[in-house]
Image (cartoon, rainbow, N blue to C red):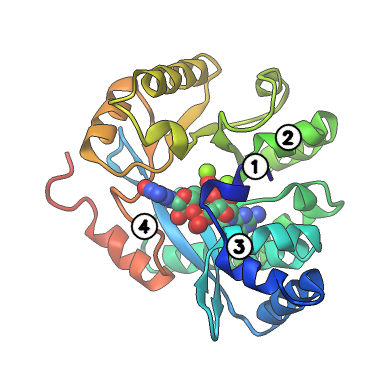
Amino acid sequence: RVKDSGRDGYCKFSQDLSEAVDERLALENALRHALREEQLELHYQPVIDMEQRRIVAVEALSRWRHPERGLIPPDCFIPIAEDTKLILPLGEWVARKAIGQFRSWRDQGVMLDCVSINTSGIQLFRPGFVEGLLGILKEYGVEGRHLQIELTENVLMQDVEVCRAVLTRLRDEGIRIAIDDFGTGYSSLAYLKQLPIDMLKIDRSFVSDVPDDPNDCAIVEAIVALAYSLDLVTIAEGVETDAQEFFLRQMGCHRLQGYRYSRPIAAGEFADFVKGFPWGGFP
Ligand code: C2E
Ligand code: MG
Ligand code: MG
Ligand code: MG
């Protein structure tokens, strides 16, 4: 996980635990305990469609509510979960929780097109991954088209052939596939035509300095142009300001996500947020 080591800086929690005698075991045990004791939560961040001017989707983001240490962000525990394979039960928990939540929002009249979940390579390459998701969808009576999977470029590059097989099966079920943090991984662009991808999520690092930084403007413009010609939907991540929104809209970016609209919030709050949107002032 190239990007996550450092982007959000120093991870106090894992640093503390690294000082334990057997750091890996300590973390693994703590996380295993967290899963069992239901200390994990999902927070939800809305995705706004520029043309429809409404919230079309929501991204589910994991948090660990530690009894002593408070809310721990995913960059501090997802890498450990991946190393220890705990990402498998964790990922399944995320899928069940997010899909179940989507179901209950629908039942409450909160109509979103889809819920998006972040997915690690370990999950994707695990035999039975697709069946597992389909089982959960069926359990909650949610159609595949309401689910979106976010993968990073590095995951896709691990094994393009296997990816193609798995992604094609997801696609056949209507499940959508987004490339997360697009532009930050080690990848070739060739996979974009080899794999059944639906969306590119433009990484926050390119969005944060538009419209002031001409290089970032050029990169965003190029990504949007590429996406248009390949018939992919673009989502800008990390939109915080009016000026960024204005620029991205002008570029023709389809969807925006970021603190400008909402931070990731708890499920209950999210329903109210959707009902109140668009607030006064949003064009
Ligand atoms: P991501 O999927 O790229 O998610 C976007 C991250 O940017 C989230 O951080 C979100 O809170 C943050 N963000 C959103 N809008 C803004 C903004 O306007 N400004 C700033 N500064 N930040 C913004 P978070 O929730 O800490 O998640 C970090 C990463 O952890 C995620 O990046 C994703 O790669 C990973 N992750 C989170 N939940 C899961 C999960 O359930 N499974 C897996 N495999 N990975 C997860
Ligand atoms: Mg994501
Ligand atoms: Mg991202
Ligand atoms: Mg990410």
Q: Is residue 135 visible?
A: no
Where does the N terminus fall, quadrant-wise? Answer: top right
Relative vertical location of residue 138 with respect to residue 146 in this rendering, above or below: below
Q: Earlier in the sequence, mark 1 or mark 2?
A: 1
Q: Earlier in the sequence, mark 3 or mark 1?
A: 3
**Cβ–Cβ below 8 Å for labels 1 and 2?**
yes
Q: Where residue 87 sits: x, y (%)?
A: 74, 61
Q: Residue shown at 30%/32% (left/top)?
A: 51
Q: Is mark 4 within 8 Å of ligand 1?
A: yes
Q: Amino acid at mark 1?
A: Leu
| Residue bearing the label numbered 3 | 76
Q: Residues within 10 Å of mark 1 (few under 14, many from 20)?
A: many
Q: Of the numbered discs in the image, which one, if any, rests on residue 151?
A: 1
Q: Earlier in the sequence, mark 3 or mark 4?
A: 3
Q: Earlier in the sequence, mark 3 or mark 2?
A: 3
| Residue bearing the label numbered 2 | 156
Q: Residues within 10 Å of mark 3 (few under 14, many from 20)?
A: many
Q: Is residue 148 left or right of residue 105?
A: right
Q: Amino acid at mark 3?
A: Cys
Give the CA separation, mark 4 to mark 2: 28 Å
**Cβ–Cβ below 8 Å for labels 4 and 2?**
no
Q: Of the numbered discs in the image, which one, if any, rests on residue 263?
A: 4
Q: Residues within 10 Å of mark 4 (few under 14, many from 20)?
A: some
Q: Is residue 38 left or right of residue 28?
A: left
Give the CA separation, mark 3 to mark 4: 18 Å
Where does the C terminus fall, quadrant-wise? Answer: top left
Q: Secondary structure at mark 4?
A: loop
**Cβ–Cβ below 8 Å for labels 3 and 2?**
no
Relative vertical location of residue 143 with respect to residue 20 in this rendering, above or below: above
Q: Where residue 6 sits: x, y (%)?
A: 57, 48
Q: Secondary structure at mark 3?
A: helix
